[in-house]
Image (cartoon, rainbow, N blue to C red):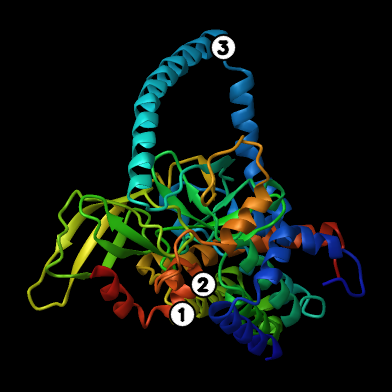
Amino acid sequence: MVAVVLSLILLVVDHRFHHLQQLRSTLAFVTYPLHYLADLPFTASSWLDETTSSRETLMEQNRELRDLNLHLRAELQKYESLQAENMRLRDLVDSSFKVGDRVLVAELSSVDLDPYKQQVIINKGSASGAYEGQPVLDAHAVMGQVINVTPLSSTVLLITDTSHALPVQVLRNGLRTIAVGTGRISELRLPYLPTNSDIVEGDLLVTSGLGGKFPPGYPVATVTRIDRSPDAPFSDVVAQPRAHLDRSREVLLVWTVPNQLPGPMTGPAPADATHTTANPEVPATGDDAAASPDNAATAEPTPPPTGQGEDR
Amino acid sequence: MSGPGNGGPAIVITLCVAMLLMILPMPEWARPFRPQWVTLVMLYWAIALPHRVGVGSGFVVGIVLDALTGTLLGQHALGLSVVTFIAIQLHQRIRVFPFWQQSLGILVLLVIEHLLSLWVMGATRGVTPGLVYWAVPLIGALLWPWIFVTLRRIRRQFKVV
């Protein structure tokens, strides 16, 4: 009976408050060997695959990558001039803007967690400078954020988890709202859009940067379905994440560096991290709570006003 | 877990293997069908050695399992402590049942554990799983005879008392 009461207390505390993070980190460190062991067959097979691949394959791959690199460089040139122009124009109108996010490539551990929670484990932890609340991207879009860090690995909450909410913006017209996870890997919902809001199928949603956790302007999802029923105050909008949440193997950890141009890739990561969390680039607004996974669940009864406020 | 008698490591290792089976990558379609390995192994030890494996061990194993699979701390701990408690109460009866009756008893315990998990998920606004959710205890009950025989063999081999 003591155990039952204790579990109930733990459940409530873990759900409502933030005090158990330390315990969870310690436990995650203890269970790291098991995670490592479960991941080992995959790592070993991919290592074997790499070491035994033929010279021809490698050369072909190399050629393809060179071609791709050339293309991307050409694109980048265009981008750089645009960026410079953008900064100049922004200087003219005196609006602050930041560019340059430091990134680090991490790899997913092939470990299955609870099937009813959208979480993954990556192989970079606090030893590499990862911190709680850090945004995680893949090659296509935003994936989620770090919720638990151990020295060698960290847990990432995907944007589709039911306890995750992300401040987003429609790229076409700047309409701001909040994207909430549904628990299904290919679905996000935008529950706080009034029926008359200007949103159409195919609209690209990008991060708005409000809430201070995610850098602004990264793609998130594409709107796939809109149900406008005349008697409901809000329309039911469903979006599909752009990130390959269930397929990506490599992910990017992002350090957002406010008001600072990109330095060399060997910049002091932990210092940046604390700096970023201390001064979010945007003054935290009402949806700050929505961006944090732990608060999102507790704040859930109240979001409608926040969402409405966002839409104006 | 490690009290008087020997073979403590055997218990710990079987539990570790069960935990490994809980997180081993599986294809996407098979993920909802993963049996409750840790619960099955815990139940075996609780029935076979009720003086060694008790509610406290169930609780600790549950917490570790929660941290391992990323669920709310206490979700598995609650279920595991409840079912180990019931198993210890009933261990003398379950032991003498034939296999199929044992499986039925285990099915009930697995359903209880799963139900508690579902309640926790429901109370904390998690996902509400579909009917597939209830296939898991069924698979666990079908696996029970093999688990029972394997673990009994391990118990005799390492003379765990």
Q: Give the amino acid at mark 2.
A: Asp
Which residue is pictured at 48% across the width and 16% down the height?
Answer: A61
Q: Give the amino acid at mark 3.
A: Ser
Percent position of residue B19, x then y: 66, 59
Percent position of residue A193, x then y: 22, 68
Q: Horizontally, is A278 left or right of A207 in the view? A: right
Residue A58 in view of the camera = yes
Q: Give the amino acid at mark 1.
A: Thr
Same-chain check, marks 2 and 3: yes
> Which disc number belongs to residue A298?
1
Measure the alpha-carbon separation of dots 2 and 3.
48 Å
In terms of image quadrants, where is residue B62? bottom right
Tell me if residue A132 comes above or below residue B82 in the rendering. above
Q: Residue A116 or A68: which is nearer the viewer?
A: A68
> Which disc number belongs to residue A54?
3
Residue A242 in view of the camera = no
Percent position of residue A148, x then y: 61, 61
Q: Residue A200 or B143: which is nearer the viewer?
A: A200
* Chain at tag 3: A
Total marks placed: 3
Q: Secondary structure at mark 3?
A: loop
Q: Horizontally, is A179 left or right of A150 in the view? A: left
The residue to which callout 2 is attached is: A294
Instruction: Give the mark toward the camera: 2 or 3.
Output: 2
Q: Residue A44 or A191: which is nearer the viewer?
A: A191
Which residue is pictured at 77% across the width and 58% down the height?
Answer: B13
Asked if the residue at tag 1 contacts the one at tag 2, i.e. Cβ–Cβ closer than 8 Å, the answer is: yes
Percent position of residue B108, x then y: 52, 78
Same-chain check, marks 2 and 1: yes
Q: Residue A85 or B75: which is nearer the viewer?
A: A85
